[in-house]
Image: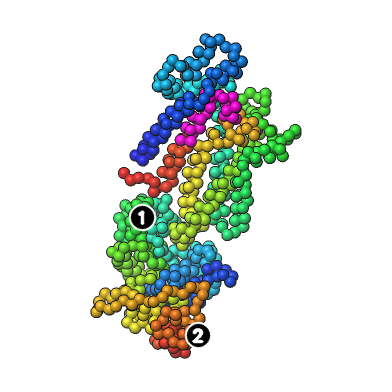
Amino acid sequence: MKERILEVRGLNVDYGMGPESVRAVRDVDLTLHRGEVLGLAGESGSGKSTLAYGMTRLLPPPGIVAGGEVIYHLDDGTTVDLLRIRDADLRRLRWSEIAIVFQGAINSLNPVQRISTQLVDVLKAHSASTPRARLDRARELLTLVGIASDRLNSYPHQLSGGMRQRVMIAMALALEPRVVIMDEPTTALDVVVQRQILRTLVDLRERLGFSVVFITHDLSLLVEFSDRIAIMYAGQVVEEAASADLYRTPLHPYSDGLLQSFPALKGPKRELSGIAGSPPDLRMMPSGCPFHPRCARAMDVCGQQTPVLGQSRAGRSVACWLHPVSVG
Amino acid sequence: MSYLLKRLGFYLLTVWAAVTINFFVPRMIPGDPVQALITKQRGQMTSEAVRSLYVLFGLDKDESLASQYFSYLGQLLRGDLGMSFTFFPSPVADVIGDGLPWTVGLVGITTVIGFFLGTAAGALVGWRRGTWADSLIPVTTFVSSIPYFWLGLVAIALLTGPGSFFPASGAYEIGLVPNWDWQFIGSTVQHGLLPGLTILVSSVSGWILSMRNMMVTVSSDDYVTVAHAKGLPERRVMLAYAARNALLPNVSGFALALGFIVGGTLLVEIVFSYPGLGLQLFQAVGAKDYPLLQGIFLIITLSVLLANLLADVAYLALDPRTRREG
């Protein structure tokens, strides 16, 4: 087994407090290993981004982490719980250990400051170096993601969407973090630019060896780029498997539905079926399995009891009554 | 740079339009300043004197409107705004010159202090939203809705009177000769304190409110979340990321407020009998002093335009997105 680097255990995230609150992430367990790309997929509103924000304590109000732990394994072998360490310690850990590439590349950069300022301030906040060295490093980072270093003095509005996302990636790698969380990093970009950026990311990951949590609604991307995939539905992980296994034999009907929602690149043509219906209202979750109202293979038990995520066979976890969990 | 030149051209055009309107409007209102002056002198004027008055006010019947207009422009360029009736025979330029420093000193200083104080407080309150700081909001909303002249009347009623530190009227003690000695400066500060505080209290809450609201909006922007995620010190996130962007709308508001310094606080000057431009404007209206009115309007127009120009320059400096390439 590979070395663990980030473990999420029993994470619950609520929006709002008291009886009006809505649980957007429910009992999520995830493990990220060193050097691995973990994909997190699901429809919009399935809690993917909330999970990412929740585990890094960046959740905007009214989001509240209601329980669980996020264990981070430091280089020296000790562990810290990100949800419980002091603010100052967390701030030191942020970006130097865990960096994030956010969803909206367009709005992730401060519009009134030059790229150089925004690249340099993160270096300044985390390390004692000379201004000269910081500027050199910023230049080096831009070159790393394929941007001419003379764009250093540009303002964000002078760059295209793709370039801005490249800058964000350069910024994320500035302190050589061990974990990079990518929250739909290519969603706002066109397909050609998406490809280029993902290519850059894959190359960089091979060279620098960081682990990635890759969040997207586009399962086809994950199949290609990630080692393992966790499928989320209504705030819960419903299936987790190695990407090849998941692609070949999805166990959960929801995973199967997601895979049926995009055309295969190779092989014979087939009808795209998609998934009927829409995700449940989190304020009125159906009884039993949250997916059963949309599930074509639902049985009686599905409406009555909630399946739990467990190992159904070697290396595969699923929460579905079709695949009873083997105990022990 | 060409953008700024274009703006400058636009402002010059506006100045010309303002000056022209300023010339025509008094000539279109019924009534005649010379007649008003004759009435004031109870008709004891020779016809010779009346004729020379018409010439003096540029209302010479023998001259065409066009030549009146051009001689008016010529006079303006020389800084000659005509003669005031109420302060006859002082030229309007001198009268305004007497009042302007008091207004700019009192209202200008309080406007600037109010802006900086209010913006800083608003940034802080907006940053700490959801804490005790939010309880300040109803208070500032209440205070900002109080008319400042009413606040002034209350202040006079409560704080001034025999034996009080605060004088109820004037800009300095009667009998002092205006010059730069400590006694005079002290007296000026003492007299300016109450009207200044009145303006400050009512203007500062407006800045707090608008800055606080912008701060709350900006704080949920992606780049602020990114700044947090980068592990930057909280001070830097607040100042360089949130406040720096939230400031932009307030800056244009500030420039406009600067423009209204000259004419905007008429009522405070009336309430406190403060010898500024506002009080002069009030007296000029009462006395049908057309040249003085015209002069003060011109000054107000020019200062609003100048403030707008300042706002443009400030925006260019603060928001790179407004700078055109090339």
Can you give x and y, in whole percent of width and height, for residue A80 in the image? 51, 71
Can you give x and y, in whole percent of width and height, for residue A328 in the image? 47, 89
> What residue is at 57 percent from the left and 12 percent from the top?
B45
Question: Looking at the image, can residue B197 be seen?
Answer: no
- Is residue B134 inside the magenta stretch? no
Closer to the camera in the image, B269 or B223? B269
The residue carrying pointer 2 sits among few (fewer than 14), some (14 to 19) or many (20 or more) residues within 10 Å by Cα, namely few
Q: Which amino acid does label 1 sit on?
A: Asp
Of badges 2 and 1, nearer the viewer stands 2
Residue at far bottom of view: A327
Quadrant in which the C terminus of chain B appears: top left
Lower position in the chain sequence, tag 2 or tag 1: 1
Residue range highlighted in magenta: B279-305
Q: Mark 2 points at which residue?
A: A304
Q: Mark 1 points at which residue?
A: A136
Q: Is residue A251 above or below residue A52?
A: below
Q: What residue type is labelled 2?
A: Gln
Closer to the camera in the image, B23 or B302? B23
Q: Do labels 2 and 1 share a chain?
A: yes
Can you give x and y, in whole percent of width and height, for residue A140 in the image? 34, 58
Q: In this view, does B283 lie above or below B159?
A: above
How far apart are the two marked residues, 2 and 1, measured between alpha carbons? Answer: 61 Å
Quadrant in which the N terminus of chain B appears: top left
